[in-house]
Amino acid sequence: MFILHHLRRAIFLCLLPLLIAGCGGLQEVWEGPGAKMFRPQAIAVLPPMASQYDNAREDIQEVLSGALNRTANIERVVSPENVTDIFQASKEAFDALVFYFSRLEMTGQSDKDSAVKLGKALNVDSFLVVRVNSWEYMRKEGDNVGRVGLSLRLVDATTGTTVWKARHERSSSYMFYRPNLKDIAKELAAEMIKAMPPQGKP
């Protein structure tokens, strides 16, 4: 009986991280030590990083900005149009973006110096890094589905620190009429932004 009790306890402790990870509903979530206290005043969605789904980049940037605008916990969201204008008008800002993405691809880490430069160029204290993991119609377990998947990284633009990152996807099955992938993306964005700091007012 004593051994059985400890066996059950060991199994529970092994499963506990999985149970905690599943509570938020997202496939993967990581929070930095300062995430609970992070309360940015302004945020911008960077142009999504290059992937095989580049045709979805503008739609995703628009959808995420819209989801952020509906979140009362961040006062100002820079529009995708303004973000584009800033990178087109400033070579320094564009070079910082290219360098930031390059370092992120190579090291998996947020580069402090270029992150701070991006924050100053965009006049924000935080920004969202986006990768489109899927944007497609496919067959899944015998069904036709439309699928959208995203990876998001919230960065403190005053320090270059990654505050939060997550990966998730949503799919919608159909018989004859394909669902609009942008509509699926809106549902996905709303779910992910809801889980992103800050989650409550100070």
Image: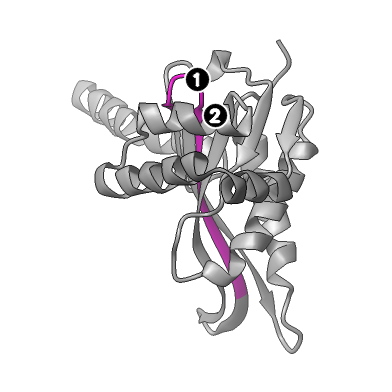
Residue at the extreme left of the image, as rendered: 3
Q: Is mark 1 on a helix, strand or loop?
A: loop
Q: Which of the two residues, 45 or 32, is positioned nearer the viewer here?
A: 45
Residue at 61% from the left image edge and 34% from the top image edge: 122
Residue type for callout 1: Thr
The relative height of residue 129 versus residue 136 in the rendered view (above or below) is above
Q: What element carries label 2?
A: helix
Asked whether 156 falls inside the magenta stretch, the response is: yes
The relative height of residue 176 versus residue 13 in the rendered view (above or below) is below
Residue span colored magenta: 146-163
Where does the image place residue 121, in percent across and percent down from the top left? 57, 32
The residue identified by callout 2 is: 119
The residue identified by callout 1 is: 158
Where does the image place residue 88, in percent across and percent down from the top left? 59, 51
Circle 2 residues within 10 Å: few <14, some 14–19, many ≥20: many
Residue at the extreme top of the image, as rendered: 202
Q: Residue 163: in sight, yes or no? A: no
Q: In this view, does 152 lie to the left or right of 67?
A: left
Q: Which of the two residues, 155 or 101, is positioned nearer the viewer here?
A: 101
Residue at 65% from the left image edge and 53% from the top image edge: 61
Q: Which of the two residues, 103 or 68, is positioned nearer the viewer here?
A: 103
Asked whether 185 falls inside the magenta stretch, the response is: no
Q: Is the magenta stretch mostly helix, strand or loop?
A: strand
The relative height of residue 87 versus residue 163 in the rendered view (above or below) is below
